[in-house]
Image (cartoon, helix red, strand yellow):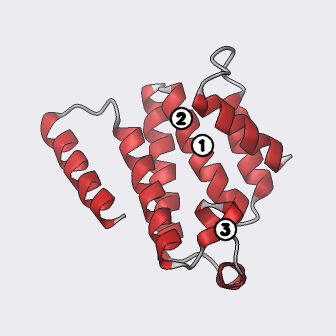
Amino acid sequence: MEEGLRAWDGAADAMDHSGEHFLEAEIHRLKGELLLGQEDKSGSHAAIYRPEQKSVLSIVERAKGKNKHETEAERCFQQALKVARGQEAKLLELRAATSLSRLWHQQDKKTEARELLAETYGWFNEGFDTRDLKEAKILLAELS
């Protein structure tokens, strides 16, 4: 995860220097996923990123509230949403909404998660066999 975050820093620097921002939303989203992956690696909050790995420790720690990785990841996902919406990049918006909804789902914010993801998913009228739309559909089913 640390190597991934270093690569992220390089990508963010390259984006800033080149002026090319067409993948900016994805860069922010990936940082959020990497931050959540750091939690998973440490053994705490494992349920946040991979629900199938729930443990007593993760449930107890989650009950105490968000940690710094969750807070920063949420900010990254929100920024990814903002950028994607500004660029009218619906696929990147869907990815960011899926990541944020997954995090909110694990934080028992199911209503907010479902509303966000359903709004974004509802925009699509084709491409339902793609990985992004399949993942969003599965998460929506879990949130229902």
Crowdedness near tag 2: few (<14), some (14–19) or many (≥20) residues, C-alpha within 10 Å: many
Amino acid carrying mark 1 in the image: Ala
Residue at position x 54%, y 26% in the image: 90
The earlier-in-sequence mark between 3 and 2 is 3
The disc placed on residue 16 is none
Query: Spatial distance from mark 1 to mark 3, Cα to Cα?
Result: 22 Å
Circle 2/circle 1 CB separation < 8 Å: yes
The residue singled out by tag 2 in the image is: 93
Q: Nearer the viewer, mark 1 or mark 3?
A: 3
Q: Residue at x 47, y 55 (%)?
A: 33
- Residue plotted at (23% across, 46% down): 11
Q: Amino acid at mark 3?
A: Gln
Say which element carries label 1: helix
Mark 3 or mark 2: which is in front? Answer: 3
Residue 94 sits above or below residue 101 on the image: above
Say which mark, if any, is on residue 97: 1
Q: Residue furthest right?
A: 144
